[in-house]
Amino acid sequence: MTFEYELTVATTASPADVWALWSDIGSWHAWDPAVERVALEGHFAEGAAGTMSLVGGVEAPFMLEIVEPGARFLDRLSIGDLVIRIDHQVSATDGGAEVLVRTTVEGPGADDIGPMVTGDTPKALEALTGMAERR
């Protein structure tokens, strides 16, 4: 079973300002309402692993599967039999940047869990782009 969700927003912030927040895992809790804290072993690079503490007391191991500095990263969280992949992409536009987040939830109950996982995505992107615009 697979659940998919995608949201794209425009911002006047530069791709570099968005990337600066994405690549600073210490800032994730400030713009993503679902995240309490993130611990990453090593640098923000492909193959780096860590633990994400989510609101509600859920701790999930995660790994950076793809990192294209300044443009894209994809992280994979594992919660029991569920695998959640969140693909983050930023690209330049005439007036700033376009930010795309694509979430895929795979496993038993994905259709039920997916909407809960992605429910805060609009708020997270609004907070992220707002912070990036103020940089």
Image (cartoon, rainbow, N blue to C red):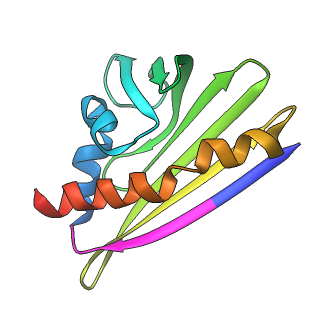
Residue toward you, 135 or 15: 135
Specify the farthest residue to the front.
56
For residue 72, side relative to residue 76 (left or right): left
- In the rendered image of this protein, does residue 22 appear above or below residue 44? below
Residue at the image position 33 percent from the left and 47 percent from the top: 69
- Residue 52 at what x, y percent from top left? 47, 22
Residue at the image position 87 percent from the left and 31 percent from the top: 108
Residue at the image position 27 percent from the left and 63 percent from the top: 15
Specify the farthest residue to the left.
135
- In the rendered image of this protein, does residue 108 appear above or below residue 95? above
Residue toward you, 126 or 44: 126
How would you classify the magenta stretch by its main secondary structure?
strand
For residue 108, side relative to residue 135 (left or right): right
Q: Is residue 124 magenta?
A: no
Quadrant of the image occupied by residue 32: top left
Locate the N terminus by quadrant: top right
- In the rendered image of this protein, does residue 101 appear above or below residue 66? below
- Residue 53 at what x, y percent from top left? 46, 20
- In the rendered image of this protein, does residue 96 appear above or below residue 61? below
For residue 107, side relative to residue 125 (left or right): right
Residues drawn in magenta: 6-13
Residue at the image position 48 percent from the left and 27 percent from the top: 55
Q: Is residue 11 magenta?
A: yes
